Image (cartoon, rainbow, N blue to C red):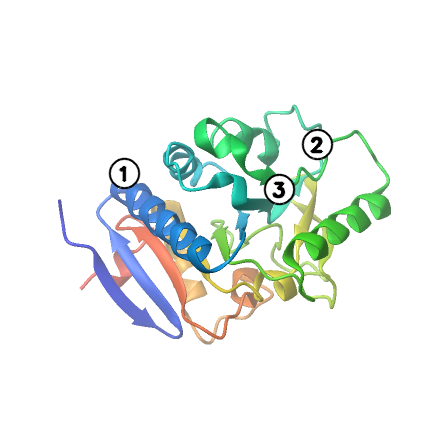
Amino acid sequence: MDEMIKQSINGYTLNIYEDKLELSSAVFKFIESQIIHTLKIKDRFKFCVSGGSTPKSVYQLLSRSDIGWEMVDVFLGDERCVDPDSELSNSLMLKKSLLTNYGSKAFFYEIFSELNTNEEAIKKLFISKLLEKCGTNPPAFDLTLLGLGDDGHTASLFPYQQNNNVDDFVIFNQGKGLKRISLTPKVLSASSKIIFLVSGASKKLALKRLLDEKEPNDRTPSKLIKSSSQISIFCDQESAKEFLI
């Protein structure tokens, strides 16, 4: 096993692991420790998670850890506007990974739990539940786990979309041929701790752009996520070859 390589670049802490297996194990251990520590001092842990294929193995590991899941509130940072039983649904992926085993005890807010096509009603319900569970304005999570698309998107904040950074909590957007609902940078940036999970050679350019101070936000919307503390990026060597010494 190679040593993890740690670097600090332009407000981000880069944690580079040998491969996806070691990366998944490290992210699992980090999230597990965050939940355990927070629940010693707070009644509930508010966790914003990402969809996609990269975090699935992390979620499977977390689900098998008995860490007081009944005190954890889980929200998706974004969701595709599809039937909740569709294989394209992030909620379905979570139900098959994070929300199994011990993780089944967590509170999970499913954005499209009913086949309601009224966008304004869906948005209002989402915001209402965020404010109720988080108790702050803007809603603030204890931990937000974000992905990074090969085009530089995160959540459903896609390149060159006009409403990516509006003064709101929730937006509808288009991306990769699908309509989506997403939390905005205003909410995601309010999180106490923010981590990006990045894996694979296809993410090399997106990661380089995320860490580049001169990169424009409209081309790489993941740069819209800011934090008063260091943002951690957990990545494998394939995605971070540019930064290996």
- Looking at the rendered structure, the kind of residue marked 1 is Leu
- Looking at the rendered structure, the kind of residue marked 2 is Val
Residue 179 screen position, x and y as percent: 72, 41
Element type where label 1 sits in the image: helix
* Mark nearer the viewer, 1 or 3: 1
Q: Name the residue under label 1.
A: 21
Quadrant for the N terminus in the image: top left
Looking at the image, is mark 3 or mark 2 earlier in the sequence? 2
Quadrant for the C terminus in the image: bottom left
Asked if marks 3 and 2 touch (Cβ < 8 Å), the reply is no
Q: Mark 2 points at which residue?
A: 82
- Looking at the rendered structure, the kind of residue marked 3 is Lys
Q: Name the residue under label 3.
A: 176
Residue 232 screen position, x and y as percent: 38, 62
Element type where label 2 sits in the image: loop
Is residue 206 at least partly visible in the picture? no
Please state which of residues 125 and 40 is positioned toward the viewer in this rendering: 40
Element type where label 3 sits in the image: loop
Residue 61 screen position, x and y as percent: 36, 35
- 12 with respect to 151 (left or right): left
Count of residue discs: 3
x 37%, y 47%: residue? 32
Looking at the image, is mark 2 or mark 1 earlier in the sequence? 1
* Mark nearer the viewer, 3 or 2: 2
x 61%, y 39%: residue? 108
- Above or below: residue 13 compared with residue 108: below
- 209 with respect to 79 (left or right): left
